[in-house]
Image (spheres, rainbow, N blue to C red):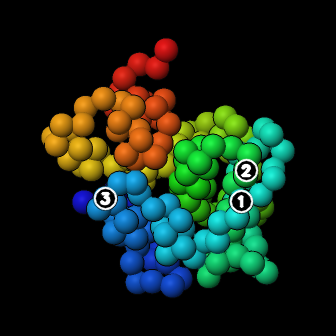
């Protein structure tokens, strides 16, 4: 089931698929391959030693960017689950806020604040969660008997906090 995407989103450079269709084709099993999604969207992903308060950034990269001309950098010092969420978050910025990217880099600190409005950051976080933890796939796991947060988080390679938020469980 494709993710709902704004209708004004253009088809990608390397594909005749919309971003929503590209994401959906990678959501058939967990964990979701965010690197493949980035690649299919024409984004190169780099692991870098970024300052401790920077989780990631998406930037125009004429030399090493993917077919879109953009790259995503993730903080090499952060955990793999955090890096996966950062990649999904930056993909969301690419899809939702492309106009902002044309005017400069978007650098997200550890709280995913990039200088965009809180509504734009919230939208990027929401789409990142949709990418990594699609509800239909979560439901399949729950129906198959996997009902505890630690097991679901491990299966989707996300943090337990991210899974709790996705499931609507209060985080204490």
Q: Residue at x 73, y 50 (%)?
A: 75
Residue at mark 3:
29
In this image, 24 relative to 47: left or right? left
Is the Cβ of the residue at disc 1 closer than 8 Å to that at disc 2?
Answer: yes
Residue 118, horizontal then vertical, whole percent: 61, 36
- The answer to whether 100 is drawn above or below residue 134 in the figure is below
Direction top: furthest residue = 172
In this image, 54 relative to 112: left or right? right
Local SS, label 1: strand
Residue 47, label in figure: 1
Residue at mark 2:
75
The answer to whether residue 114 of the structure is visible from this angle is no
Q: Residue at x 70, y 37 (%)?
A: 110
- Front residue of 117/67: it is 67
Q: Dot 1 surroundings within 10 Å: few (below 14), some, or many (20 or more)?
A: some
Quarter holding the N terminus is: bottom left
Q: Dot 2 surroundings within 10 Å: few (below 14), some, or many (20 or more)?
A: many
- Front residue of 146/58: it is 146
Q: Dot 3 surroundings within 10 Å: few (below 14), some, or many (20 or more)?
A: some
Q: Residue at x 59, y 55 (%)?
A: 87
Cα–Cα span, label 1 and label 3: 25 Å
Cα–Cα span, label 2 and label 3: 26 Å
- Front residue of 123/108: it is 108
The earlier-in-sequence mark between 1 and 2 is 1
Residue 57, horizontal then vertical, whole percent: 71, 55
């Amino acid at each position: 089931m494709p993710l709902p995407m704004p209708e004004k989103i253009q088809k990608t450079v390397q594909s005749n698929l919309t971003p929503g269709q590209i994401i959906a084709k990678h959501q058939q099993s967990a964990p979701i391959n965010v690197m493949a999604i980035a690649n299919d969207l024409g984004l190169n992903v780099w692991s870098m030693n970024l300052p401790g308060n920077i989780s990631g950034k998406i930037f125009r990269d004429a030399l090493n960017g993917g077919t879109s001309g953009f790259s995503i950098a993730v903080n090499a010092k952060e955990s793999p689950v955090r890096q996966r969420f950062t990649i999904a978050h930056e993909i969301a910025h690419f899809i939702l806020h492309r106009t902002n990217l044309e005017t400069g880099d978007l650098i997200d600190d550890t709280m995913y604040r990039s200088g965009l409005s809180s509504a734009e950051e919230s939208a990027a976080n929401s789409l990142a969660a949709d990418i990594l933890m699609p509800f239909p796939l979560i439901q399949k796991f729950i129906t198959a008997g996997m009902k505890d947060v630690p097991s679901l988080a491990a299966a989707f390679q996300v943090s337990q906090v991210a899974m709790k938020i996705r499931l609507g469980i209060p985080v204490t």
